Amino acid sequence: MHWNSIGEFFAMGGYALYVWGSFGACALLLAMEPLLVKQRLTAVRRLLRRERLADSLEKNYP
């Protein structure tokens, strides 16, 4: 496609809401993914620490 102005580019031939909405949704998901992975990793590490502590307490108190 060929646009004559920057306004026409951002209007995307009448499909601006779909096009820019898709870009926005993709950018949001790409930004959220590392945050969610870090949150899950923290939760798993916390769970493993609790299990290790429970095992050590169980061994010390028969």
Image (cartoon, helix red, strand yellow):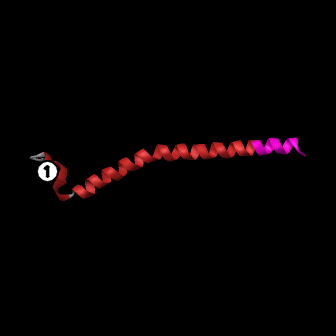
Residue position marked by numbered label 1 in the rendering: 8
- Left/right placement of residue 15 relative to residue 61 reads left
Q: Position of residue 38 (x, y in %)?
A: 53, 43
Residue 21 part of the magenta segment? no
Q: Position of residue 51 (x, y in %)?
A: 73, 45
Describe the element under mark 1 as helix, strand or loop: helix
Kind of residue sitting beneath label 1: Glu
Q: Nearer the viewer, residue 28 or 1?
A: 28
Q: Which residues are magenta?
A: 53-62
Give the residue displayed 35% in from the left and 53% down from the top. 25
Main SS class of the magenta portion in the image: helix
- Left/right placement of residue 46 relative to residue 37 reads right
Residue 24 visible in image = yes
Give the residue displayed 48% in from the left and 44% down from the top. 35
- Left/right placement of residue 28 relative to residue 37 reads left
Q: How many marks?
A: 1
Give the residue displayed 41% in from the left and 45% down from the top. 31
Q: Nearer the viewer, residue 12 or 52?
A: 52
Residue extending furthest toward the left: 4
Q: Quadrant of residue 15?
A: bottom left
Q: Position of residue 46 (x, y in %)?
A: 65, 44
Residue density around tag 1, few if under 14, some if 14–19, many if 20 or more, within 10 Å = few
Residue 58 part of the magenta segment? yes
Residue 1 visible in image = no
